[in-house]
Amino acid sequence: MKTTKLILTGIIAVLLCATSCKKQIDTTAEPASENLKASQEGEWKSAYYLGSLISYQRINGQNIFNGDMILTDDQLSASPQKTDVQTEGHGQNNVWPSATIYYYISTNFTTSERSVITSAINDWANKTGLSFVSRNTGTYLRIQRGSANNCTVGYVSNATMNLSDPSAKGIVVHELGHAIGLHHEQLRADRDTYIDVKWSNISTSAQGSYNKITGMNYGGTTFDFASIMLYGSYNGYGAINSSLPTTTRKNGTTWVDPSWSGSKTPSAGDVSWVKTMYGL
């Protein structure tokens, strides 16, 4: 009888501890809005974007294109859209009005991480002449911690940047490029003159995410291997074999993602691209 009482007492103690522990975990958890689960396992869909047919993944209610660009439903179309790349800025009117990007950095970043984010913002501001103003009302870019690095493209409602690597400056600079309105360099309409896409090493479902975007305006710039917006040869997005490249130079050589190597800052080509796009 005494043994039974001891067992029951032990069970009750364990249950009480479990309940207490659960309460502690719940109260310290980050807000749901700060934790965007971003798995690469999403439903593949097709639509037109800036005049080109693309494939993208629908993940947690968001349209993820070419790895880290979040496209709004309004930016996608069921049919081709006529785009005048010479007069419509970046293929769409997605530049921020008055060349001013409003942003808010969520409070759940560490002091060191906030310093990296601020440094990345200053790089774009000092080099391009864009204005970055902190605010959390009206239309603004919300910079928050996430389970992946991705960002909306240009001036859109609910503009959002998610960072899983907030201490990696090159990654932050890259995602800010998307927020400004830039796309990936490897998707340029003129890319086939400079690089080869290794279609045989890209899964069938992901191949449409490597289609060239013909409606983009690069402000007269040419393909830039130093661009912070260029994926490395071994980026691995959609790769069948991650040890093999998805892109190479025309001579077969490879390069490292500029956001992970080199200066990890906007290139001269990136700066020219932004200045032309915003008329700076």
Image (spheres, rainbow, N blue to C red):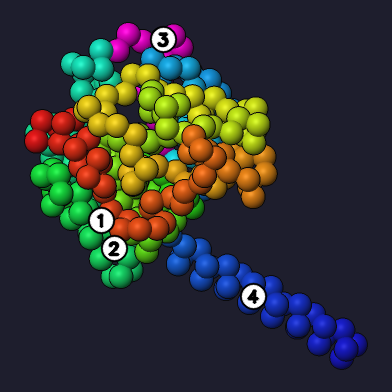
Q: Which residues are magenta?
A: 69-83
> Which of the numbered marks, if any, corresponds to residue 116?
2
What is the CA distance from the residue labelled 1 to the residue labelled 2?
6 Å
Q: Earlier in the sequence, mark 4 or mark 1?
A: 4
Check disc 2 and give the amino acid type: Val
Residue 58 is at least partly visible in this image: no
Earlier sequence position, callout 1 versus callout 3? 3
The residue at the point 36 percent across, 10 percent down is 81
Residue farthest along the right direction in this orientation: 1
Q: Are marks 2 and 3 in contact (CB under 8 Å)?
A: no
Q: Position of residue 162 (x, y in %)?
A: 39, 49
Mark 3 sits on what residue? 80
Quarter holding the C terminus is: top left
Residue 25 visible somewhere in the drawing: yes
Considering only order in the chain, which callout, 3 or 2, is on the residue closer to the N terminus? Answer: 3
Q: Residue at x 18, y 16 (%)?
A: 87
Q: Quadrant of the N terminus?
A: bottom right
Tell me if residue 135 comes above or below residue 55 in the rendering: below
Cα–Cα gap, marks 4 and 3: 61 Å
Q: Which residue is mark 4?
A: 16
